[in-house]
Amino acid sequence: MIRTILFLITLGVFIPAPSSWGLTLASHPGMKVEEGLVFEPLCPQKRSTPKAPDEYLNRVNPLEPTERNIFAGQTLFHFDAVPGPCRVCHGISGNGLSILLRKLTPSPRNFTCAQAMDSLPDGQLFWIIQNGSPGTAMPAFKGLADEQIWQLIHYIRHFSEKHSSEPSY
Ligand code: HEC
């Protein structure tokens, strides 16, 4: 009997728990208790990220959004950034609905939300990517060259640009 149950579990066949146990709901992938029952990108999103120092806030991206720069940003976002690729938290579509969504409070920024992203200057994004957001899961990416951070910024901005000809993922 035990062997059969173990076998079924290996196959991914789970015995549904009665909803009165609370287990069925709690394991729903869309559930994030602190912010309500959501499985939609949060937009607008509550934001309490520290403000960059003035000398950063005034900086604008010095790089052109060329194919090469966007591609470099895209590669860092999805694979190469250390300590961890951005997509692990911000999601493959940049909307913050990653596999870690339920674990992280505050939630990772939703880059597809133009309402939020349009009000954030390039220099703010630069500062947070370089230094992290203390007390949250957003780490400091100290090992990235300035050029790489600006390439990432071109890439993450494409998520909120409606008529973008840039990559759609
Ligand atoms: C381990 C999870 C994690 C990883 C990896 C991660 N982020 Fe974040 N990021 C977060 C969280 C959580 C927040 C929200 C922080 C807050 O609200 O202060 C955030 C916020 C941000 C913001 C918002 C800044 C602002 O002022 O609102 C930017 C930009 C950002 N991340 C860019 C990146 C980039 C680029 C990468 C990869 C190089 C990356 N993140 C990797 C979790 C992560």
Image (tube, rainbow, N blue to C red):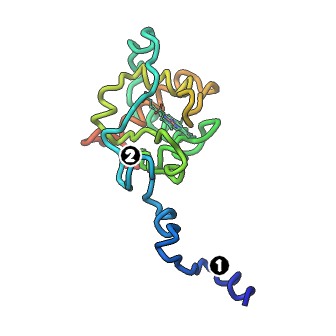
Question: Counting other residues with Cα less than 10 Å from the Cα at mark 1, is it few (<14), some (14-19), or many (20 or more)?
Answer: few
Q: Quadrant of the N terminus?
A: bottom right
Residue under the image location 58 percent in, 81 percent down: 13
Q: Quadrant of residue 38?
A: bottom left
Q: Secondary structure at mark 1?
A: helix
Pick whichever of labels 1 and 2 is earlier in the sequence: 1
Question: Counting other residues with Cα less than 10 Å from the Cα at mark 2, is it few (<14), some (14-19), or many (20 or more)?
Answer: few
Q: Position of residue 136 (x, y in %)?
A: 54, 34
Amino acid beneath label 2: Pro
Amino acid beneath label 1: Ile
Residue under the image location 64 percent in, 36 percent down: 83
Q: Position of residue 16 (x, y in %)?
A: 52, 78
What residue sits right under mark 2 in the picture? 167
What residue sits right under mark 1 in the picture? 9
Q: Secondary structure at mark 2?
A: loop
Q: Position of residue 113 (x, y in %)?
A: 32, 40
Q: Nearer the viewer, mark 1 or mark 2?
A: 1
Q: Quadrant of residue 114?
A: top left
In front of the other: 149 or 113: 113
Residue under the image location 38 percent in, 51 percent down: 36
Q: Is residue 125 left or right of residue 76?
A: left
In front of the other: 82 or 115: 115
| Vertical arrangement, residue 72 with respect to residue 150, above or below | below
C-alpha span from label 1 to label 2: 39 Å
Within 8 Å: ligand 1 and the Cβ of disc 1?
Answer: no
